[in-house]
Image (cartoon, grey):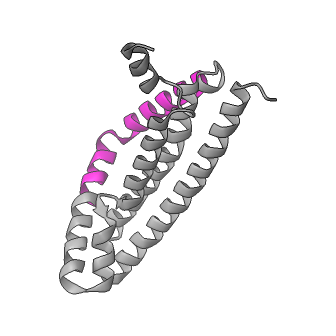
Amino acid sequence: MDWTDGIVRIIELNTFSNVWYWLIVVGIWSVVSNWLIGVPFDMLFRARRYGTAELADVEGLVDIHVRRIAAYHHSFGHWLIGLIAFVLSGVGFAGFYYGLELGQGLFVLGAPLCLIGAINVRLALELNQTPLAGKDLVHRLFRVRLWTQIIAMVTMFFTAMYGMYFSLAKLQFF
């Protein structure tokens, strides 16, 4: 084996049998679970635990991100939804109809991320219409984080099971 074979094996596009894909999956879901509409979880935890100064920081950061997300949504939200739907359906079609493993891996990762994105945009639009403050805001953000983590756990479990099935089926044990 020469050095080019080693490089090709490291960056090969097989998703479910490649360690790079799983590192990306874990990294993306840990980042998505830690940030809610641009607010890191440690700030929410400190605001719930300590009180006034930290709570004011969270309220200010939430207000900034809510206005930013609402402005983006009103400016080009429909175009972005159409583009994401087009790309995701194209990747899903290439993955599941034509059997492209990279397409399957990207679809299994991208579809739940779109759901999380929709939850965050909906939360931002709701907070833009009826702002919350204080402990009510922190409680609402904690609830959304709980649902984000539930979706992440289910998705990672499904991705692992599907990846094992795909890898075993590729070996043609069945």
Left or right of 150, for residue 124: left
Residue 43 pos. (x, y %): 27, 71
Q: Nearer the viewer, residue 9 or 50?
A: 9
Q: Which residue is drawn at the image coordinates 40% and 48% (left, top)?
A: 27
Please report the bounds of the magenta region as a residue range: 66-94
Q: Is residue 20 magenta?
A: no
Is residue 121 at all visible to an observer of this figure?
no
Q: Quadrant of residue 153?
A: bottom right
Total tally of numbered discs in the picture? 0
* Left-right relation of 105 to 163: left
- Point 40% across, 13% down: residue: 2
In the rendered image, which quarter is residue 63 located in?
Answer: bottom left
Query: Magenta segment, principal secondary structure?
Result: helix
Q: Is residue 84 above or below residue 117?
A: above
At a point 28% along the width and 79% down the height, the residue shown is 47
Front residue of this view, candidates 46 and 128: 46
Considering every residue shown, the one lying at the far front of the view is 1
Residue 158 % position (x, y) = 63, 47
Residue toward you, 131 or 156? 156
Using residue 15 as the reference point, say whether residue 82 is left or right of it. left
Residue 165 coordinates in the image, percent (x, y): 70, 37
Q: Nearer the viewer, residue 17 or 27?
A: 17
x, y (%) of residue 137?
Answer: 35, 75
Is residue 2 at least partly visible in the picture? yes
